[in-house]
Image (cartoon, rainbow, N blue to C red):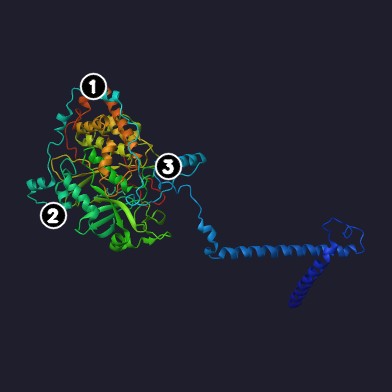
Amino acid sequence: MFASRIRFRRIQEVSDDLLCDSIAIGSSSLLPSPSGSRSHSPSSSSPIPSSVVGYAARGMRRCNIRRLFTFAFFIFATTLLILSLPKENFGREWADPPHSQEAPYGIKSQHDEPLVRQKFDDAKRGAQRPLPHQVLPPSIDKNQNGDPFDFPSSADRITLTRIKEHLKRIDLDQLDSDRCKQNMTLSEYWLRTKRKYVPEEDSWEKFYAQIGSCSVYTKQNVIDELLRDLNRLPIKSAHIMDGGTQVKLVITFSNDKQAVFKPMRFGRDYESDPNHFYFSDFERHNAEIATFHLDRVLGFHRAVPTVGRIVNMTSELLENAEKKLKKTFFYSPAKNLCFVSRCDYYCDTTHAICGKPDLKEGSMQVFLPDEHHVPRKHNRSPYRRTYSKKNQVAEWQSDMNYCIEKVKTRKQYAHGRRLLDLVDLHILDYLIGNQDRHHYESFNVFEGIEPYAIHLDNGRAFGRTDIDDDDILLPLRQCCVIRPSTLATLLKFYSTPKSLSKTLHESMAKDPVHPILAFKHYPAIERRLGKIVQYLLKCFDSHAAEYVVMNEYHNPNLPMGNGDEEERSTEEESPKEPPATAKKTGPA
Ligand SMILES: Nc1ncnc2c1ncn2[C@@H]1O[C@H](COP(=O)(O)OP(=O)(O)OP(=O)(O)O)[C@@H](O)[C@H]1O
Ligand SMILES: [Mn+2]
């Protein structure tokens, strides 16, 4: 019964097909002619019976549906076939790849007129901002020409005259002679207190030996030798650096001494995304180098010696990499050697560090002496930001009495150099545009001498040339205190033809990977210096100069105590908001 039904259906299908063909042959005579003649139309008086016409029409509809399906299937199969063919068959497309509007950015100099015009046109059209890109190391691809100092000065004679008027009873040089009451090097100190001898066999040891009680270094020739070695010594091994949030390598040289290597991520023209928070901004290797120079030019000598170096990623990194690091190396589709490393922020394939094809520029920063031998203290800054995208305003940003009520009254800041150090640090941060000063470290080694703040971790500086974040200066604006040496240096650069940016440029020109900064940062530095001086004038207008210029702050309402005691803050450190790729929250 079942078998006969199947047989019947097959017979029906075959007869349908035959019928379809016969209708197809005959239908042309049944359907209206394209000319519109109704002579053979089914509705016209025809010798063919209407039942036959109805049957033919139904058959026609079925046939048309079938044809339609067959046609659609054919188109689908052809498309599939075309898509599955190898791409080489479409050389036309690949010979002329799509052009990105962003491509010219960073390749030509900012002084390139047509580029400026194009950027302007793009802005009008609503072009995208330049994407992060890794261009050739500038020492290979030199493209910064023109006079970098061809911009109007921000110095204002009236402001300067008014400040000088306020300072007429103050002898800055005389005050400065008191800056470092117990000035000695680590080797002098250990020899005297512990009869301990500090070796000075190589540039690292010479640097460690001369770490001072008031500054990280003093002798320039020792630093020059150290920078040369950091740039040239053969690399013996490369390890992933623990601590911190972004990619960093610990490099061990042939003399078994070490450095921190931060690889280049962006070209010099890169401006950080204004929608990124300070805590999700990328680290910039050139910011580390430039800040070392600026710190030195300002006479602080509290930044850690840092130099640029172009490394061969194959022979210097990959071949000497520890297993964990080696595993993260790969070749990009552009045949460049890349690595990802391991860290909390941006250590993934989309943020890989890629060479050209295997050359990579980066910053080499001398490793500070082992903390077991030369201990350091990690101090939480009272002026740290919230590190939260929900609560973006810290107490110090909303309460202008914060310094008077919450900082000057704290044991750690009520007596001594620490408040002045904080102001120095924030003056430096304002000039470099660093919003990420959550902690600062200090050597905890010279007993009985108050430690100073080391200007360490400046990788998030020099992100924007068009934004001056005046909040960075709030320690100066609220506390209204400044060291005589810092004030004298700022006024010197503000008032003399040898500007701060020119001096910085000269200093950075000695670095092997110069230019270190895009020239557009120079007017930004001068503009910020101008604003610092304006804020200083405000302080002098509201406080007697004697209460503003000092080497140490002493709160008359608080007894001298042990300011070095561990800080017991009542505030909880707010959790940090990590970027999408982050695993951990908060800075180290
Ligand atoms: N040159 C150095 N010598 C010794 N230790 C260093 C050096 N540079 C950094 N460190 C240590 O590593 C820690 C992290 O470094 P750094 O702050 O540069 O990393 P980071 O990725 O910027 O971290 P974060 O996001 O927390 O600021 C520092 O707090 C410091 O203790
Ligand atoms: Mn950092």
Q: Specify the quadrant of the image occupied by residue 414.
A: top left
Residue labelled with disc 2? 201
**Secondary structure under badge 2?**
loop
Instruction: Tell me if residue 96 can be seen.
Output: yes
Mark before the other along the chain sequence, 3 or 1? 1
Mark 3 vs mark 1, CA separation in Å: 43 Å
**Percent of width and height locating residue 33:** 84, 59
Q: Is residue 428 left or right of residue 85?
A: left
Task: Tell whether label 1 touches label 2 (CB within 8 Å).
Answer: no
Mark before the other along the chain sequence, 2 or 1? 1
Mark before the other along the chain sequence, 2 or 3? 2
Going by the numbered disc 3, the residue's amino acid type is: Asn
**Secondary structure under badge 1?**
helix
**Which mark's residue is nearer the viewer, 3 or 1?**
1
Mark 2 vs mark 1, CA separation in Å: 51 Å
Q: Specify the quadrant of the image occupied by residue 314.
A: bottom left
Q: Residue at x 29, y 25 (%)?
A: 157
Residue labelled with disc 3? 275
Q: Is residue 465 left or right of residue 53?
A: left
Q: Is residue 309 above or below residue 75?
A: above
* Label number found at residue 165: 1
Q: Is residue 548 left or right of residue 326?
A: left
